[in-house]
Image: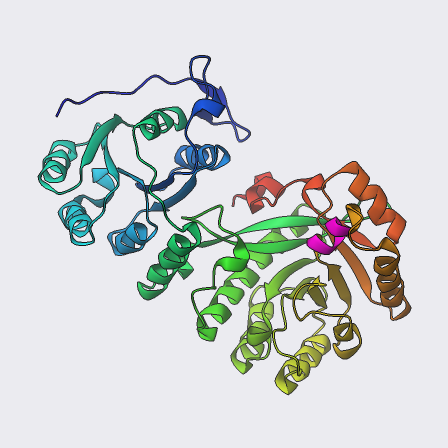
Amino acid sequence: MPLTSMTMRQSVPSDDGLAYALITDPAHPKQSLPAGHRILFLDHEDRIAKIVHRQLEEAGHKVAWIGLPSEERAGLAFQPDLIVMNPDASAANQHAFIGLMDELGYAGALTILRPSIHFREAMALAEQSDVEQVDWLDAPYTAKTVGELLRETPRKPHDGDTGDRHFLSWLIQQGRLLPNLTHDFHVKRTLRDDRVAGYETLTRLRNRPSLNPEHIFAPSTIVSLEIAATLLAVEGAAKLLAALQDDGRQVPVAVNCSAAVLAHSDFITALPIRLRRYGIPAGMLGIELTEISYPGLDGHLLENMRELGRLGIPISLDNFGKGATNFDRISELPISEVKIDRKIFQKCVKGEFPSSLLKEIIDYCRSRSIGTVIEGIETENDLVLARTLGADCGQGFYWGKPMPLSSIVPHSGA
């Protein structure tokens, strides 16, 4: 099989000072490149590679990344159309990985990175396998060179959500979910004067960066795993709190917590230990209760919420107006804040939900000394409406997307 190098690339500065390749050029504009592929990268973790992955996501593809032999079965469960493999990333296991592709009947394309001391051995193994489309690409790869590969890569019909669920399920089975969790932070601002009022900690999957945080635990009902992940988020929040304090701008940071976790004794026992370990002052770490899926309130949940109140941990009711999180919860739960779900607010923006009713809810919260946050503020018009409704704070892409700690406090060393 002839080997065809695809190394033409154009570099521009990125927002973090690195160079990355544009996925467009005059001969092949962005809209002419195929979209909707699922791409798996087996490679070392690298900042420039992350930028390439992000560009491919922005072009309409779904990207996953794995770096250890123990994650390879999860990677194939992602249902990729194209695998880009660096033999150096898994030199000891490249034979087993290609054998696994055979075993599971992988029907997509495989591209092997070169230069590499293991490149020719990997190519020989791949050509002996049942993988029909085997190619190679110079390293480091770029969004443009991968995009060119996708021109010749068939896009298989598949249920993307199923691929994500299977990917997560295998990470859980292989004990690789928690090590792959990372955290971004979304700013919350006061609507009266636009000051930073705090940050929300969002759990991300490092090797599937565009996955909605709400879906990370969908394949699992293991409460102990959710507790461990929530405590990791607390640690992430503690790092941001410390960096903000050193920078002279102390504001609270919140973490998301499901009702199942908040009702569990293990979490309530472990949380104060984390507060003492990281020296978090009262009122600076908040809990956002993400959902209550049962009609009757669990006695343990209420008891634990009151206990957190005694510890000086404020609790927000997140996603108000979504699912079982209804108006009754405001009076039943010991909360200090209600966050209006972005879908409700956007329906209000479009005239599909009466703004007068949303204002009544906000006024009712104020009468009970409960703060209000409107989520989903994305435009200047959204901001004007949110201020008209009288909410205390706002959150949304109008002020920017969630960011890592290093972007919020650049000299933090994170």
* Camera-nearest residue between 153 and 383: 153
Q: Is residue 340 visible?
A: yes
The reply, left or right, for residue 26 in relation to residue 172 is right
Give the image quarter of residue 147: top left
- Considering every residue shown, the one lying at the far top of the view is 26
Q: Position of residue 22 (x, y in %)?
A: 46, 23
**Quarter of the rendering containing residue 255:** bottom right
The quarter of the rendered structure image containing the N terminus is top left
Q: Residue at x 67, y 82 (%)?
A: 297
> Which residue range is magenta in the image?
343-347
- Asked whether 197 falls inside the magenta stretch, the response is no
- How would you classify the magenta stretch by its main secondary structure? helix
What residue lies at 88% left-to-right and 67% top-to-bottom?
Answer: 364
Report x, y in % for residue 361. Answer: 84, 64
Residue at (50, 34) in percent of width and height:
58
Closer-to-camera residue (15/212): 212
Colour pattern: rainbow
- Residue at 71%, 80% in the rendered image: 306
In this rendering, the answer to whether 39 lies above or below 136 is below
Q: Seen in the image, is 330 located left or right of residue 205? A: right
Depicted 382 relative to depicted 74: above or below: above
In this rendering, the count of numbered labels is 0
- In the figure, is residue 217 to the left or right of 268? left
User: Compared with residue 400, is residue 258 higher up or lower down, i.e. above or below?
Assistant: below
Please indicate, yes or no, whether residue 22 appears anywhere in the rendered image. no
| Residue 346 is inside the magenta segment | yes
Q: Percent from the top left, x then y, of residue 414?
A: 52, 45
Q: Looking at the image, is 296 positioned above or below residue 24?
A: below
Identify which residue, 109 or 67, lies in the foreground. Answer: 109
Where's residue 204, x and y in %? Answer: 50, 52
